[in-house]
Amino acid sequence: MPVLASFICGLIFGAGLLISGMTDPQKVLGFLDLFGAWDATLAFVMAGAVAVAASGFAIAQRRAAPTFSARFLWPDRNDIDAPLVGGAILFGIGWGLAGICPGPALVNLAGLSLPIVVFVVAMLAGMIGQNLFGKNLWRPRTMAPGAAETASLPSRADG
Amino acid sequence: MHDFTPISGFAGGALIGLAAALLMLLTGRIAGVTGIVGGLLQPDTADRSWRIAFILGLIAAPLIAALFGAPLPRPAMNGSLVVIAIAGLLVGFGTRMGNGCTSGHGVCGFARLSGRSIVATFIFMTAAIATVAIARHVIGG
């Protein structure tokens, strides 16, 4: 059941991206182009998404456990560290170059156009590269005893 | 140029928010595409099936729409394949390093009022706006 629920959530998420127009990189770039013919649509997408998600999260916070699993895995970090800032800058540059972020990239993969396939392969390579090498750039190589156990799990990262 | 479409934008956004709300209420997970995909690419991840299912749902959405006559998404993209590949690398590396993208930090983080996510969203929006300004109005102008 949790797997079916995840599939349906992915389906609804993808439908939302398609209906909102955010799978079209030109529309995203139209929002990011503050100094050109500005298209404010993305702000309305964010407003709709945040309003509904916040309502759902408020319901979740009053419940003991999710329907199909043992516990809610809320992100548990509040610190603003160098990887957060540096990663956001690198992501923003890439997003501004192409007008595509990870969700729309995967939805667009269904059309199998060459630029999208190139983008997705490069994106996955970037993620694997960060998984392999990125952590060593920022974290001290010698962790204090027990630090590995308290480090946040991948599944509990922000997003 | 593209039209301003606030109604379909808000409606589509509401569906994105609904998907994020349902994923938390039903499975206890945050609907962050970077975290879902990135976790799948790590060898030590135990929970793979729900991640694969969510990604298949994303890809299935336009395929199901195509059954009802919608065209498959084959968007026009700017720049050469080299620029697109560089953009993809930056998006993949940056989102993993910063622990989230537009969905995880932008939608879910704002909905949780996470200071960390709000800062990240402000930074990647600013970096993207600056990149477009330079590409379109400094280099391309």
Image (cartoon, rainbow, N blue to C red):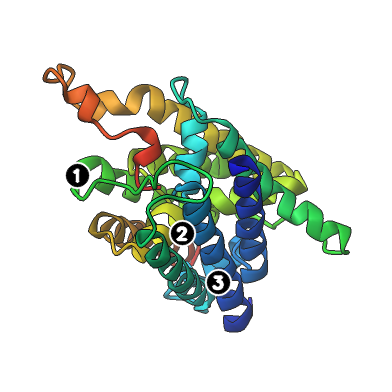
Q: Is residue A15 visible?
A: yes
Mark 3 — on which chain does it sit?
A: B
Tell me whether the residue at label 1 lies in contact with that at label 2, contact meaning CB atoms closer than 8 angstroms. Answer: no
Q: Are tags 3 and 1 found on a single chain? A: no
Question: Label 2: how many residues lie within 10 Å, few (<14), some (14-19) or many (20+)?
Answer: some
Mark 1 — on which chain does it sit?
A: A
Residue A28 position in % (x across, y down): 54, 65
Q: Amino acid at mark 1?
A: Asp
State the residue at coordinates (56%, 59%). B19
**Residue B92, placed above or below residue A61:** above
Direction left: furthest residue = A144
Marks 3 and 1, Cα distance to the nearest angstrom? Answer: 31 Å
Of marks 2 and 3, which one's residue comes earlier in the chain? 3
Q: Mark 2 against mark 3, which lies toward the viewer?
A: 3
Task: Decide which of B131, B25 is in the foreground and name it.
Answer: B25
- Circle 1 sits on which residue? A81
State the residue at coordinates (52%, 72%). A45
Q: Secondary structure at mark 3?
A: helix
In the figure, is residue A83 to the left or right of A96?
Answer: left
Q: Amino acid at mark 2?
A: Ala
- Circle 3 sits on which residue? B14
Q: Quadrant of residue B14?
A: bottom right
